[in-house]
Image: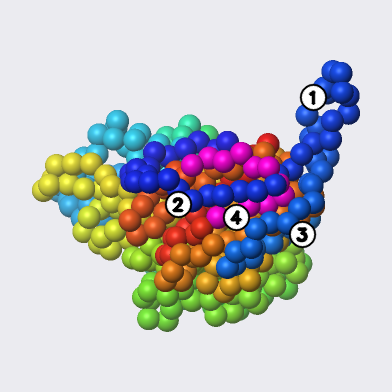
């Protein structure tokens, strides 16, 4: 079973989870019972499940995307932007987060929440002045990798890995001001110096994004990205570096589609691309509602070339909007990885919109708070582990949203009741489902955070339950 996160709200009464008629494994020896067979050999008995307002059907034989995981964009703990404080003598944040508290935050994100991904973004400054006129010759003495420019992010990754971080990648906010926007040669030299630095520090980048939101502030053309991918990819292959390319990591699916199509149409560039990534912002930049425009086409493009689709940055101040967005990304667009905007941030901006809010009084660190978005993301990330396969799940009621996943020998269901009234739901498990003997569940609603409901031993190929209005509930069925 996945590790449990302690709920903030305790049950105030018996939870309504009534389950019927479970899977049984056929006995083969009446005298000396054999060991239980693997889940695939379980036989689901026939039977009629009690009726309910909503019918949900789960068929693990029909599979969709494989999940890569969940994560966030990262900030360094001493970045002034984290708390919006500044110490002029150090050039860093005036609020100092003790090492033990940093470890607690990393535990909250990568152990308790089971995030496995980190995307870091940096401002220009690694190469303030061109090292020389020849992009084939790198004078490292002209490069500054200190702190936020690179080395601080290496330290963050090395610190987070023991807590569960497995995937990290860079996405620079801008290229250096002196660089050309039409010829990527100097950019390629710069990017390779950064990628080599990561390798030399013992934290080889699994992925590299050419730029953060190239269709926004950077304004890099599709041709620039295509050519940069080709040049970097060739150099990585020649040097035996395992880093792969992520494209285009753009502000919304519309501009991402334009750039991804150009890059992937080139067979040389295509061989170096490992994933397609997009954000969900609108033209005005407000995060109130996700921008899904052209995301279906981007998903189709990813499938055409056998690539995973990532949602690599977005946030929302409303936790339930975030819950519905995660459901849509997984169920409607076959997204394989979801990264929230920030894992932790200070109390000065978008209060409550980050997963974790770092609190302080003046320049004194006072602790951190897990926001509702944290618990919402956990209804997915704590149970749907990398390598899980999303399987078919259909609902007879448009207000009841459900996704299902096979995780090793477990079946995981995530259900949202977006309506204004409680709903009774019948969940029918098709033949071929994992051998289910018990069910646990947790619920987050406006008044609850990861509330553990009463465990039940199943006795049939399905169950009925009541989904609370405006809630998200995760069910884990295990042998």
Contact, mark 2 vs mark 4 (Cβ under 8 Å): no
Quarter of the figure with the C terminus: top right
Asked if residue 459 lies in the magenta stretch, the reply is yes
- First in residue order: circle 3 vs circle 2: 3
Quarter of the figure with the N terminus: top right
Residue at image point 80% right, 40% down:
42
The answer to which quarter of the image holds residue 394 is bottom right
Helix, strand, or loop for circle 3?
A: strand
Q: Which residue is mark 1?
A: 35
Contact, mark 2 vs mark 1 (Cβ under 8 Å): no
Helix, strand, or loop for circle 1?
A: loop
Indicate which label's residue lies in the foreground, 3 or 4.
4
- First in residue order: circle 2 vs circle 1: 1
User: How many neighbours does mark 1 have within 10 angstroms: few (below 14), some (14-19), or many (20 or more)?
Assistant: few
- First in residue order: circle 3 vs circle 4: 3
Q: Which residue is mark 4?
A: 464
User: How many neighbours does mark 2 have within 10 angstroms: few (below 14), some (14-19), or many (20 or more)?
Assistant: many
Residue at image point 50% right, 36% down:
3
Q: Which mark is residue 217?
A: none
Q: Which residue is mark 2?
A: 443
Extent of the magenta region: 454-465
User: How many neighbours does mark 3 have within 10 angstroms: few (below 14), some (14-19), or many (20 or more)?
Assistant: few
With 356 as the anchor, is 430 left or right in this view?
right
- First in residue order: circle 2 vs circle 4: 2
**As drawn, 25 above or below 51:** above
Helix, strand, or loop for circle 4?
A: strand
Q: CA distance from mark 3 to mark 2?
A: 26 Å
Q: CA distance from mark 3 to mark 4?
A: 22 Å
- First in residue order: circle 3 vs circle 1: 1
Residue at image point 59% right, 67% down:
54
């Amino acid at each position: 079973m996945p590790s449990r996160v302690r709920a903030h709200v305790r049950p105030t009464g018996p939870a309504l989870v009534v389950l019927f008629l479970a899977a049984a494994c056929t006995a083969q020896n009446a005298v000396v019972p054999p060991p239980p067979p693997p889940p695939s050999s379980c036989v689901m008995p026939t039977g009629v499940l009690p009726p309910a307002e909503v019918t949900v059907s789960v068929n693990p034989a029909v599979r969709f995307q494989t999940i890569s995981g969940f994560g966030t964009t990262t900030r360094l703990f001493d970045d002034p932007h984290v708390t919006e404080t500044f110490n002029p003598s150090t050039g860093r944040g005036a609020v100092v987060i003790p090492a033990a508290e940093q470890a607690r935050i990393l535990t909250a994100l990568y152990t308790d929440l089971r995030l496995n991904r980190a995307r870091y973004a940096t401002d220009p400054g690694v190469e303030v002045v061109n090292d020389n006129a020849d992009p084939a010759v790198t004078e490292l003495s002209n490069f500054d990798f200190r702190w936020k420019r690179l080395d601080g992010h290496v330290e963050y990754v090395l610190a987070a890995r023991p807590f569960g971080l497995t995937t990290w990648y860079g996405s620079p906010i801008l290229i250096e001001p002196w660089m050309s926007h039409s010829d990527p040669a100097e950019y390629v030299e710069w990017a390779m110096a950064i990628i080599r630095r990561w390798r030399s520090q013992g934290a080889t980048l699994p992925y590299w994004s050419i730029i953060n939101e190239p269709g926004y502030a950077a304004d890099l053309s599709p041709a620039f990205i295509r050519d940069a991918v080709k040049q970097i990819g060739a150099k990585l292959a020649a040097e035996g570096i395992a880093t792969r390319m992520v494209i285009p990591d753009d502000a919304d699916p519309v501009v991402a589609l334009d750039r991804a199509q150009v890059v992937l149409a080139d067979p040389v560039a295509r061989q170096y691309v490992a994933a397609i990534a997009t954000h969900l912002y609108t033209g005005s930049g407000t995060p109130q509602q996700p921008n899904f425009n052209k995301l279906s086409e981007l998903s189709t493009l990813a499938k055409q070339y056998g690539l995973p689709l990532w949602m690599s940055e977005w946030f929302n101040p409303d936790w339930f909007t975030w819950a519905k967005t995660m459901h849509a990304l997984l169920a409607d667009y076959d997204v394989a990885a979801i990264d929230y905007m920030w894992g932790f941030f200070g109390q000065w901006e978008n209060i409550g919109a980050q997963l974790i809010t770092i609190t302080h009084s003046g320049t004194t660190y006072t602790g951190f708070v897990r926001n509702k978005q944290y618990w919402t993301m956990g209804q997915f990330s704590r149970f749907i582990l990398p390598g899980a396969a999303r399987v078919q799940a259909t609902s007879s009621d448009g207000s009841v949203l459900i996704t299902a996943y096979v995780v090793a020998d477990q079946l995981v269901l995530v259900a949202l009741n977006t309506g204004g009234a409680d709903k009774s739901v019948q969940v029918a498990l098709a033949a071929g489902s994992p051998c289910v003997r018990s069910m646990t569940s947790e619920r987050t609603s406006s008044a609850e955070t990861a509330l553990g409901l009463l465990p039940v031993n199943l006795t049939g190929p399905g169950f009925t339950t009541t989904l609370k209005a405006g809630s998200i509930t995760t069910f884990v069925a295990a042998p």
